[in-house]
Image: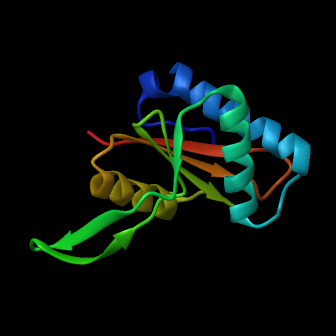
Amino acid sequence: MNADTNQDFLNSEETHAIIGCSFEVLNEIGHGLHEKIYENALVVEFGQRGIPYIQQPEYDVEYKTVQVGKYVPDLITHQKIVVDTKTIEKITEHERGKMLNYLKITGLKIGLIINFKHAKLEWLSVARK
Protein backbone atom coordinates (compact mmCIF):
# COMPACT_ATOMS: atom_id res chain seq x y z
CA MET A 1 0.00 0.00 0.00
CA ASN A 2 1.71 3.10 -1.18
CA ALA A 3 -1.38 5.18 -0.50
CA ASP A 4 -1.79 8.64 0.90
CA THR A 5 -4.53 10.81 2.35
CA ASN A 6 -2.81 14.06 1.42
CA GLN A 7 -1.22 14.39 -2.03
CA ASP A 8 0.98 17.35 -1.00
CA PHE A 9 2.51 15.22 1.76
CA LEU A 10 3.19 12.31 -0.58
CA ASN A 11 5.19 14.56 -2.87
CA SER A 12 7.05 16.39 -0.15
CA GLU A 13 10.82 16.44 -0.09
CA GLU A 14 10.80 15.12 3.49
CA THR A 15 8.62 12.13 2.62
CA HIS A 16 10.81 11.20 -0.31
CA ALA A 17 13.88 11.42 1.90
CA ILE A 18 12.37 9.14 4.57
CA ILE A 19 11.18 6.59 2.01
CA GLY A 20 14.56 6.73 0.28
CA CYS A 21 16.27 5.94 3.58
CA SER A 22 13.83 3.09 4.11
CA PHE A 23 14.67 1.57 0.72
CA GLU A 24 18.37 1.83 1.54
CA VAL A 25 17.86 0.09 4.90
CA LEU A 26 15.78 -2.68 3.32
CA ASN A 27 18.33 -3.19 0.56
CA GLU A 28 21.22 -3.34 3.05
CA ILE A 29 19.85 -5.61 5.80
CA GLY A 30 16.92 -7.36 4.15
CA HIS A 31 13.35 -7.88 5.28
CA GLY A 32 11.51 -9.58 8.13
CA LEU A 33 13.75 -8.72 11.10
CA HIS A 34 12.50 -7.11 14.32
CA GLU A 35 11.03 -3.61 14.10
CA LYS A 36 13.66 -2.15 16.45
CA ILE A 37 16.43 -3.14 14.03
CA TYR A 38 14.79 -1.09 11.27
CA GLU A 39 14.20 1.84 13.61
CA ASN A 40 17.87 1.83 14.61
CA ALA A 41 19.04 1.40 11.02
CA LEU A 42 16.91 4.37 9.96
CA VAL A 43 18.58 6.43 12.69
CA VAL A 44 21.97 5.58 11.17
CA GLU A 45 20.75 6.41 7.66
CA PHE A 46 19.11 9.66 8.78
CA GLY A 47 22.36 10.67 10.47
CA GLN A 48 24.39 9.94 7.36
CA ARG A 49 22.00 11.97 5.20
CA GLY A 50 21.66 14.86 7.61
CA ILE A 51 17.95 14.28 8.25
CA PRO A 52 16.88 15.75 11.60
CA TYR A 53 15.23 13.21 13.92
CA ILE A 54 14.43 12.38 17.51
CA GLN A 55 14.31 8.73 18.53
CA GLN A 56 11.61 7.66 20.98
CA PRO A 57 10.57 10.98 22.51
CA GLU A 58 7.90 10.76 25.23
CA TYR A 59 4.48 12.38 25.00
CA ASP A 60 1.95 12.52 27.82
CA VAL A 61 -1.41 10.87 27.18
CA GLU A 62 -4.21 12.63 29.01
CA TYR A 63 -7.76 11.67 29.79
CA LYS A 64 -9.96 14.52 30.99
CA THR A 65 -6.86 16.57 31.87
CA VAL A 66 -5.32 13.72 33.89
CA GLN A 67 -2.13 12.10 32.66
CA VAL A 68 -2.85 8.39 32.22
CA GLY A 69 0.27 7.27 30.40
CA LYS A 70 2.96 7.97 27.85
CA TYR A 71 3.15 7.48 24.10
CA VAL A 72 6.63 6.87 22.72
CA PRO A 73 6.83 7.05 18.91
CA ASP A 74 9.65 5.29 17.09
CA LEU A 75 10.89 8.45 15.39
CA ILE A 76 9.99 12.07 14.78
CA THR A 77 11.70 13.59 11.73
CA HIS A 78 11.91 17.18 10.57
CA GLN A 79 10.09 18.16 13.80
CA LYS A 80 6.81 17.30 12.07
CA ILE A 81 6.59 13.68 10.88
CA VAL A 82 5.86 10.64 13.06
CA VAL A 83 7.64 7.60 11.59
CA ASP A 84 6.38 4.19 12.73
CA THR A 85 8.45 1.15 11.70
CA LYS A 86 6.58 -2.13 11.29
CA THR A 87 7.20 -5.76 10.40
CA ILE A 88 3.61 -6.87 9.88
CA GLU A 89 1.90 -8.85 7.15
CA LYS A 90 0.16 -5.78 5.69
CA ILE A 91 -0.60 -2.19 6.67
CA THR A 92 -4.34 -1.98 7.33
CA GLU A 93 -6.93 0.53 8.49
CA HIS A 94 -6.04 -0.54 12.04
CA GLU A 95 -2.52 0.87 11.68
CA ARG A 96 -3.89 3.97 9.96
CA GLY A 97 -6.27 4.55 12.87
CA LYS A 98 -3.48 4.12 15.38
CA MET A 99 -1.36 6.64 13.49
CA LEU A 100 -4.21 9.16 13.61
CA ASN A 101 -4.24 8.72 17.40
CA TYR A 102 -0.46 9.17 17.52
CA LEU A 103 -0.77 12.38 15.54
CA LYS A 104 -3.43 13.66 17.91
CA ILE A 105 -1.26 12.89 20.96
CA THR A 106 1.87 14.50 19.50
CA GLY A 107 0.05 17.47 17.99
CA LEU A 108 1.71 16.73 14.65
CA LYS A 109 -0.15 16.47 11.35
CA ILE A 110 1.89 13.98 9.31
CA GLY A 111 2.65 10.31 9.89
CA LEU A 112 4.44 7.65 7.89
CA ILE A 113 4.03 3.92 8.54
CA ILE A 114 6.83 1.87 6.98
CA ASN A 115 6.57 -1.91 6.75
CA PHE A 116 9.79 -3.92 6.39
CA LYS A 117 8.16 -7.38 6.57
CA HIS A 118 8.54 -8.28 2.89
CA ALA A 119 11.16 -7.87 0.18
CA LYS A 120 9.06 -5.05 -1.31
CA LEU A 121 8.86 -2.00 0.95
CA GLU A 122 5.33 -0.98 1.93
CA TRP A 123 4.40 2.42 3.33
CA LEU A 124 1.35 4.49 4.14
CA SER A 125 1.33 8.22 4.73
CA VAL A 126 -1.34 9.64 7.00
CA ALA A 127 -2.30 13.27 7.44
CA ARG A 128 -4.43 14.76 10.22
CA LYS A 129 -6.47 17.85 9.54
Residue 47 falls left or right of residue 6: right
| Residue 10: x %, y % from top left | 52, 27
Using the rendered view, name the quadrant where residue 69 is placed: bottom left
Q: How is the image coloured?
A: rainbow
Q: Quadrant of the N terminus?
A: top right
Q: Quadrant of the C terminus?
A: top left
Is 41 placed above or below 127 here?
Answer: below
Is 4 placed above or below 26 here?
Answer: above
| Residue 60: x %, y % from top left | 28, 66
Q: State the residue in front, 14 or 51.
A: 51
Q: State the residue in front, 52 or 8.
A: 52
Is 24 placed above or below 56 here?
Answer: above
| Residue 94: x %, y % from top left | 48, 64
Using the rendered view, name the quadrant where residue 66 is placed: bottom left
| Residue 90: x %, y % from top left | 67, 59
Is 102 placed above or below 42 here?
Answer: below
Residue 20 falls left or right of residue 26: left
Question: At 53% across and 41% down in the image, what residue appears?
Answer: 53
Question: At 80% across and 43% down in the image, what residue appears?
Answer: 25
Q: State the residue in front, 17 or 40.
A: 40
User: Is residue 12 visible to the viewer in this orientation of the structure?
Assistant: yes
Question: At 69% across and 45% down in the image, what residue appears?
Answer: 42
**Count of picture labels:** 0
Going by the picture, which residue comes out furthest to the bottom? 68
Question: At 63% across and 27% down in the image, what residue appears?
Answer: 50
User: Is residue 88 visible to the viewer in this orientation of the structure?
Assistant: no
